[in-house]
Amino acid sequence: MSSVYDTLVERGFIEQCTHEKELRELLEKEKVTFYIGFDATADSLTAGHFLTIMAMMHMQKAGHRPIALLGGGTTMIGDPSMRSDMRQMMTIEQIQHNADCFKEQLSHFISFDNDQAILANNADWLLDLNYVSFLRDVGVHFSVNKMLTAECYKSRMEQGLTFFEFNYMLMQSYDFLELNRRYGCCLQMGGNDQWSNILGGVDLIRRKEQKPAYGLTFKLLTTSDGKKMGKTQKGAVWLDPNRTSPYEFYQYWRNIEDVKVEECLGLLTFLPMDEVHRLGALEGAEINKAKEVLAYEITKIVHGEEEAKKAQEAAKALFVSGGVAGSVPTFTYPKETLDAGVDIVSILVDTKLAPTRSEARRLVKQGGVTVNDVKVPSFDAVYGSKDFNDSDAFMVKKGKKGFYQIKAQ
């Protein structure tokens, strides 16, 4: 009998695992309670979180029980992993608001009905800890020498690591211990940048409770040159449709690198692996068909089938009729401003299709900007209400990937 562990391996999730043989057998034979933590550093989850959410969904489908742990306490410190500087400190009110937003988003992916999953917040046990008792109970099990060899700390030694952040590993390890005591949680999962922190929790439970505990990490989504995926010129790709529209979300995945298509199909969709391999093997212009499937499937999971269809139709319509109202990212000017006309350089900067006016001029000069599919002749060109199409808007395109419709308020 195969287990969800085999599914995660086949689809490309697993990077590192403690006690692999034991864990594989456990997942085959028993219903396992596991957890993944989400520090509430913003009011929306991102495309980076989505990979771990997909893993939770696979686990729950296989009959295991997820704990989504909101980091109401740990967010007050901030994880030093993969960072060259200290995180900006946030207020309790900001963190609580963000945690509430995470709770709402996670419920779209994970079923919390009838104890199928648990939503917890580590603020419940971290914020009222007695520091001396904590050091005696937990700190005594951690070697500073060993902690300093952890990648999350080692990479910060030159820039400077505060004692404030040095506590993070102990707090996350204590989370695992607390969840083990409260809910019988024996497995922590997370991104590969969490490996050191996860090892701390596994070791703490095995020492203090004399119980088996396991850790498992997933690969991080990166571009071919090693940069984290899920970032654009405008910033993170958010799961909240008010921060990244379903159309922009669709377009992000539609335009990823060719070499990443098969990997993302395996990790971020539920398509059968035979179909993943078939689509991933397409070459040349055919790979665009695979990208359209990828973008549609991910958008369907995150935003629903209706929004995925609208985004797909909008992307196709951009090449033939100027777009579908409401699906394409839109920038509005006051009606009187558009009646008078706005120069193309200002439009490019206002929509953030160009970061600066000089970059906007360069794009126009190189012939990379069109309005209603007609090349902009010069950076002095002015557009406005007279250029509206049937949707009472005009379409600005930068190259093949940047689109905005301009409308009146």
Image (spheres, rainbow, N blue to C red):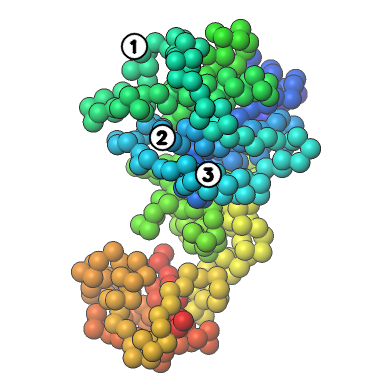
Q: Secondary structure at mark 3?
A: helix
| Residue contact between numbered discs 3 and 1, judged by CB atoms under 8 Å | no
Extreme-right residue of the structure: 114
Give the residue type at disc 1.
Asn
**How far apart, in angstroms, are the residues tagged by discs 3 and 1?**
35 Å
Nearer-N-terminus badge (1/2): 2
Disc 3 crowd, CA 10 A, few/some/many (<14, 14-19, 20+): some
Residue at the (62%, 49%) spot, across then down: 104
Left or right for 361, reference 136: left
Residue 316 vs 143, above or below: the answer is below
Give the residue type at disc 3.
Gln
Nearer-N-terminus badge (3/1): 3
Please say whether residue 236 is visible from this viewpoint.
yes
Circle on res. 169 = none
| Residue contact between numbered discs 2 and 3, judged by CB atoms under 8 Å | no
Residue 61 vs 361, above or below: the answer is above
Q: Secondary structure at mark 1?
A: helix
* Disc 1 versus disc 2: nearer the observer: 2
Give the residue type at disc 2.
Gly
Q: Which quadrant of the rendered structure holds the N terminus?
A: top right
Extreme-left residue of the structure: 358
Residue at the (37%, 31%) spot, across then down: 80
Residue that badge 2 annotates: 78
Circle on res. 145 = 1
Q: Secondary structure at mark 2?
A: loop
Residue that badge 3 annotates: 96
**Image quadrant where residue 403 sits:** bottom left
